[in-house]
Structures are given as C-alpha cells and as structure tokens.
Image: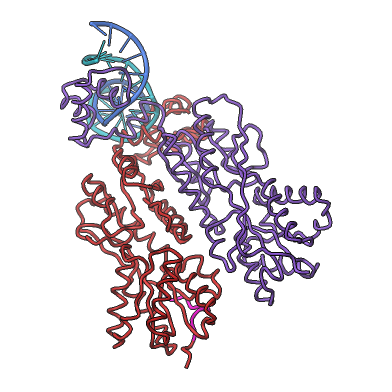
Chain colours: A purple, B red, C blue, D cyan
Amino acid sequence: MPTIYDIAREAGVSITTVSNILNNKGRFKPETVARVLEAVERLKYRPNFAAKSLAARRTNTVTLSALLTPESFDPLNLQYFGAIAQAVSRSGFNFLLHISHDLESFERFASTGICDGWLLMMIRRQDERIALLKELGVPFVSIGRPDEMEGVDIVDTDFEQTARLALEHLLALGHRRIAYLAEPLEFGYSAIRLRAYLACLKEYGLEGNADLVAETDGTEAGTVRALEALWSRDRSITAIITHDIPALTVLRTLREWGLEIPRDVSVIGCSDSPLAALADPPLTTINLYVERIAEAAAEALARRLQEPEAPPAHILIPARLVVRESTGPAPR
Amino acid sequence: MPTIYDIAREAGVSITTVSNILNNKGRFKPETVARVLEAVERLKYRPNFAAKSLAARRTNTVTLSALLTPESFDPLNLQYFGAIAQAVSRSGFNFLLHISHDLESFERFASTGICDGWLLMMIRRQDERIALLKELGVPFVSIGRPDEMEGVDIVDTDFEQTARLALEHLLALGHRRIAYLAEPLEFGYSAIRLRAYLACLKEYGLEGNADLVAETDGTEAGTVRALEALWSRDRSITAIITHDIPALTVLRTLREWGLEIPRDVSVIGCSDSPLAALADPPLTTINLYVERIAEAAAEALARRLQEPEAPPAHILIPARLVVRESTGPAPR
DNA sequence: TTGTACGCGTTATCAC
DNA sequence: GTGATAACGCGTACAA
C-alpha cells in the first residue's frame, strides 16, 4: 500500500501539499492539483484509516448499534439498516453496523474510539448502552425512547399518532368493540404505544375497551394465549390492534378458530414490516417512514457532532395508514 | 479519554509495562499486574483503536460485507449477521458489518485498511468485490460461490445435497411429477441449485421432470407468472421444489386457485428462513446450519490471515431436511 | 523487570 | 502556494 510520501515523491511536492489537496484545504495551482491527483490514481493511493483517525483525532465514522435477540428477526430491521446506511453516507460519514450480543462487546467496541458517534436502535426501557455512552462522553442519538429521555437526542415514531390512525380507521369502519394486543411491555415502544392508545380511547369516549387489552410475551404461543384470554373475556370483539409480527400469528389463529378475516374480525398491525404485505390476507398496518426516521437520526447525530453543546432534540416522525385486506366493515 | 501514559503514571510504571501487561507479553510481578489493571479499571482506559492499528500495522478486525438490494429483506440474513458476528468474535477478532449500496462505497471502505480481512456474503456470479479485493491483495473469504472460484477461499451450502434432500423426501412420499421453481438464475446459488437438481433428477431416472422447471424474476408477480406457466404446461404436478421466499407466494397462490396444501400439492422450500415456520401451512424446507457456515467462514479467514500463502479452501456445509406441514403423500 | 526512544501514516501549525 | 516539523497514542527494539 502506498503512503502519502509515495504520492508526494511521484508528484514532486511535499506531503503537506498532498494532504491539503486531498482534503480540499487552501488554494493550489490547478497544475499541482492535477499532478497530485494523477499520482493518486496511478498508485491507487487511499489514506490509511488508522493514521488519519489518529492524527485528526476523529474518525469521520458513525456506527449503528443493533442488538442480537431471538425476536429481532423482523425484516423491518433490514430496512432500517439499509436506510440508515444510506442516510449516514449521504451526511458524509463512513457507516458501520455493530451487532452486539451483550453489553460487554458493545463497550469494548465503543470505548476504542473507532467511531465519532453512535446511532442506537432496538432501545430498551433502561438501555445500558445509553448509560455507558453518556459516561464515556461519546455522542449518540437514540432511535426509540428509553424511560429516561433527559439530555438525550431522540428520534422516534410518533406513536401517539399511530394509535389514533389505527383507532380512527376502525371506528370509521363501524367497529366499537376493539381489542388491543400489546407486545412485551418491557419493550419501551410497546409501553408507549399502549399508553397512547389508552389516551386515544378516552378521547373517543371508549374507555370501556380498556379492558380488552392483553400482552404477548413475544412468542407465538404467548400470542395465542393472549388472544385466547381476550376471546374468553369478550366474544363480541370485532377488531384487534396489534403489531405486525404478532398480527401474523393472530391472523392464523383466528382462521384456525373458523373465523374469516376481515368478515368476522378486522386486524390491524403496526410498522408495515415487509412481512405485512405477504400475510394472508395482506395486513392493514401503519407505515413508519423508515427512510425519514433514518434521515432524521443521521441529521441529528451530525448536528450533535458539530455542536456538542446544543440542546438535545426530541424528534417524532409521523406515520401513515396502509390499508390492505385485513380490515373491513364491522359485522352487524 | 485516558492514554497509556495516564495508566503508567497512575500505576507508577512505564508505558512498556502497561502495554506488555495488557497484551500478555512477558512475566510480571503479580503486584505490578494488579496495580496496572486497577488503574485501567479506575480510569476506564481502553487502547485507542487507531493508534493500536497504526503501530501494529494490523487492526485485528474483520468485516462482513452485505449488499443492499430490494430482495435482501429475507430475515435469514439477520440470522447470518448474528451468527457471523458471534463466530468472528469467538475467533478473537473485532467484528464489523458493512452494508454497501454500490461498489464505490465498498471500495472506499476496503482500501482504507480499516480491517485485516473480509467476509463476503450475497455473492453474485461475477462479484466485483472479489475482483477488487484480489487486486488490492486484501484477504477475504467468500460465503457463496462466484462463477470464477479459482484461487478464492469459499464456504457455501452443499447445494448438491440440498437438491437430493428435497427430491428424496418427495419421492418417498410417492410424488413423481415434481416441478422446480428457480429464483433468478443471475444469482449464483440459484444456478448452482438448479444444476444440482437436474443432475439429481437424472440419477433417479426422472429426466422427464426437467421440463417442469420455471424461473421467477424475484418479484411476487413473477413468481405467480412462473407458477401459471408451470400449471399450464402440466396439470398433473403434485409437488413443487423452490426457495423459501417464493414458496410463500406459491402457498398463497395455490390456495387462491382452490388447491389445498399438502392434500393436492406439496411444497418444499430451501434455506429455512424464519419466515418458513410462520408460513401457512408451516413450510417444509432445508435448514442450512447457518451457525456452521458462519463458523467455517470465520475459521477460514482466520487461517488465511495467519497463512497468506496457504492453498485456497473450498468448504461445503451439509444441510438437513426440516419436515413441517406443507408436504404430504402424493394424491392418487 | 523496567525505561527510553523511535516508527506507524496522517493532520495541524507555522514559517517561508 | 508550498514545505518542515511536531503531534496523535501505541508497540517494540534496545539499553539498563
């Protein structure tokens, strides 16, 4: 691998000149620039990452932290990865993806200074990554809301709005007995969604439905159990609001029970995972605008990196209803 | 961030001692070791990645390269990511995941020397990443087979065996008119699978079925078209071999046609994507032992990094049949 | 067993 | 405009 000295020699200039030209600093004779660039091309020179980082005291790199959990097989995560990769690249940073199975591997990685800042996803209510990064003084943006949001930059879906979107869609179709099947409430977003939903119920004078709430433990069996609990409590339910992944199980279980969807029961998910369109019937759900979330997160981190002392931003991205075939008029 | 000098001062030793103790070199008084480790702990010192890499002329880091394509939403990819992350960590390297939307972003990243070696997945028939890495002289292992395998380390599924597994399963159930629905043949693995399948047919004296082969373009509509082509060619088909993702569409389309699975038609997929178990009915498929592939790839790369001149290895990992509910006895 | 000094490849500072 | 030269933080001869 050639070094900056090789280029300087080839072009007949000093390494300072090479460095400055490559980093667009100062003004140089077009001729000099040409000679340098030509040498770079010929020798296929690329500045060494380690040396550059060490000297500049910044790596110009941003890392996305994802967790490795059994539940995290939702292909929606792949959409997030892709969208964030693009958004970060566009904002001029190198992009890295780090998958940690435990906090230790995250810590080892985070404290070596391989990146300037972090994007955190799959946020938990008491996310240890946040505590760690705060302590280390490493800039980051949280994609999702932890319990303690004080002093942290946050980008998240506007779950208050998704709750409204789902409820209003069902109300417009004539549904009144609406159940809510929550994902494990230990997941921050699940707790937030439920709270928003309950508030929304109240707004529409439907507090009665607050009884029709169940929680799955995240497994298929758990979802079936939650559904059974709901059904044994009230057989007049005509619609269910849930998340995309449990919705798949709900769809199948209801059909096994001899119910037809949406004739007998309407089902609406949330997140518009790629799985939603593949479901049978295709699932009505809420699209989160993953690209906008990615864009906002990348921007927020870029700003934080530039102005370390700026006040933390809390950005909520609106979502949109995607009507497919799992919802229909309430049975009479 | 504290440096090695801070630790040396805190522990009352030289930086050499700190460095050696941290890297397990030489023998030291237990007392000295304790003092150093205690200082490290107290100041939360971690060797700086850039400085370490620069001095050692190696980064001790391995990167997995994934491509960003519309088709790549299969959650199986997430399993690969996780398994490879773990395997690489276990083999003592830092793990990075790089998602590239184009060759340029890959090249920019690969030529800065941020990692010692690469693991390549989602291999294409003429994969430009392979050409680039070869030219750069950067060590890598290809997870999947490109057309030109000469001189490259390869770890892949034994598709010759998966073909046999699927065919034998169906034959044992009494099927004789078996169709094959291939993924786009521009994907290397798809071409390899088809070739292996045709060879397997011949072995069983079933060359007649070679007519019952169709190719999807990877979209849902394309899969439906391929299925229609198959059906218009021969209505006596009782079983279909395909990949997991198109299998989902096949399942749904056949049901729309009024066919029951597996009573009227058996369907078998390949790859045991997390989606397979969620399908309706749950899909019989071939499990690829993702963990073993990951393990083998990480090992192969570690060996290559240690012995740059070792002869290239071509490792094929056997798979296993997973019988669920989409296959059954042939209708009489 | 410990300390000094140099080198890794780059950027930053400051002089010319 | 261009060029010396001193960091950057760590590993490692080599000397003590």
Q: In which quarter of the image is residue B6?
A: top left
Report if residue B15 lies within the magenta region. Answer: no
State the residue at coordinates (57%, 58%): A71
Q: Is the magenta region chiefly helix, strand or loop?
A: loop
Q: Which of B243 and B89 is in front in this view?
A: B243
Q: How many labels does the image show?
A: 0
Q: Which quadrant would residue A311 be assigned to in this image?
A: top right
Residue at the spot 52% in from the left edge and 85% down from the top edge: B263
Q: Can residue B95 be seen in this view?
A: no
In the rendered image, is residue A77 in sight? yes
* Residue placed most toward the observer, A326 or A130: A326
Q: In this view, does A207 lie above or below B202?
A: above
Q: Name the one closer to the observer, B299 or B286.
A: B286
Q: Foreground residue, B35 or A148? A: A148
Locate the C terminus of chain A and report the quarter of the image it occupies.
bottom right
Boundaries of the magenta span: B320-328
Whether B325 is among the magenta residues is: yes
Q: Is residue A300 left or right of residue B99?
A: right
Q: Is residue B185 above or below residue A52?
A: below
Rendering coords of residue B86 (x, y %): 44, 54
- Quadrant where the N terminus of chain A lies? top left
Q: Where is residue B286 in the image (x, y as percent from the top left)?
A: 43, 73
Rendered position, B47 above or below A67: above
Q: Furthest-bottom residue in view? A: B332
Instruction: Give the image location of residue B277, x and y in percent.
Output: 53, 70
Q: Where is residue B279 in the image (x, y as percent from the top left)?
A: 54, 71
